[in-house]
Amino acid sequence: MIRSAGLMAALSIAWLVLSAFTPSRAPADAENALDMLDRAARWGLSRGSVLDGARGFGGGLEYAVDESVCRLAFADRPSCDEIRGAVSSAFDRWAAGHPIIVFRDVSPSIQTDPTPGRGAEIDIVAVAGDRVRTIVHGSTESSLVLTNGVVATGPIERLESVDILIGVSECYYLNAEDEGGGCRHFPSLMLREAARAIGVGGPDAAPLSNLDTDDVAGNEIPIDCRSPSAGLKAAPVIDAAAAASGGDAQDAGRWRRGLTWDDAAARDALYPHCGITPRQRFGPVWGAFALSDSGALGVALSAPDAAAAEREAERACRRRGRGCRSATRFSGCFAVADDRAGVFAHAKAPLLKHAREDAVLACRERGGRRCRVAASACAFDDSLRP
């Protein structure tokens, strides 16, 4: 077994991004995006507890929430149990549907310790300053057994401990309906940092490292459970609404939505398994939106194929305005948001309410200040309508 000289030092390598998505960490000498995925840092399958010296998915990833986190400035003054519950829920969202990924709260029995290889596998601690950052520690291995049972040849990075450090100078809030008044939505923040804790990076951090099966962000990315890199290619497209996005989690949009297709693909590519519960799929019914220079929208629904939907949307747009741009086509639900000052964004999702929330979030990511949904619709086979 080959280990780097900097065993248990912070890994100074790049994250996995699929957003497309990307890995959070991969060897610095990785030659391309697919090589980064194959060699990206991830947790192994060591059985047992950190109390026994084991670190990995066997028995679940153990995390500890330091008491200092309960003393952070929360605008809605939640109890410590409610704060810990938000942490637990964020981890659970990343674990949902995956037969191997499990998180266990060991706060009562293991104290946090930011020293590499000490404390729980994931330590969550409040620290001085206003930054929120996640530091990973690990080692370089000659091989690693993946979650699908396949042995990956190295060098490959194995995660062994993670520190999530939350700045005490910021204010936070829990209730998604409060919108925080300038404070940061803690559950959304934890949803993002949970991604970092398992090796998933922000799709906007390194676009050239993003992976996808096509050049469209936000749609489904099929992952082969036996060969997770099959069909993937470098695709510098960005799903601004991804939970793993590196943007500041100022509002509850990410939390309401949960994982996007791109988030799920990143997780499943790092931790492939043939027993993952498949997500909802849609029938071969298409819709499209087209947008003119003046802001006029053309809408098409229930077209037999994507090209027909695009043509119909463009015709509808030209009846209302000039300079119609190419239609954005979709199978599922779609929404367009704008801030009435020139910032537009769109999003696709399985459910209409999620598409609307994602579009507003994407508009804000592009700098919109008063983003609102301008139009939304779903294209479904009637038998598959939610």
Image (tube, rainbow, N blue to C red):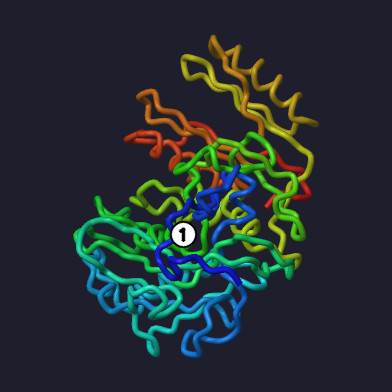
In the rendered image, is residue 341 in sight? yes
Q: Amino acid at mark 1?
A: Arg
Front residue (pair 199, 308)? 199
Q: Secondary structure at mark 1?
A: helix
Report the residue that reaches farthest toward the top.
322
Q: Vertically, is 319 above or below 196?
A: above
Residue at (50% x, 67% y) in the render: 139
Front residue (pair 96, 359)? 96
Residue at (35% x, 24% y) in the render: 341
- Residue 261 percent coordinates (x, y): 61, 50
Residue at (50% x, 65% y) in the render: 4
Counting the numbered discs, the total is 1
- Residue 207 percent coordinates (x, y): 51, 39
Front residue (pair 306, 43)? 43
Q: Vertically, is 332 above or below 142?
A: above
- Residue 211 percent coordinates (x, y): 61, 43
Q: Mark 1 Cα within 10 Å, few/some/many (few <14, many 20+)?
A: many
Q: Would residue 20 appear left or right of 108 to someone viewing this image? A: right
In what quadrant of the picture does the N terminus appear? bottom right
Identify residue for label 1. 196
Q: Quadrant of residue 72?
A: bottom left
Q: Would residue 256 appear left or right of 98 to someone viewing this image? A: left
Q: Would residue 202 appear left or right of 383 to someone viewing this image? A: left
- Residue 358 percent coordinates (x, y): 50, 44
In the rendered image, is residue 276 in sight? no
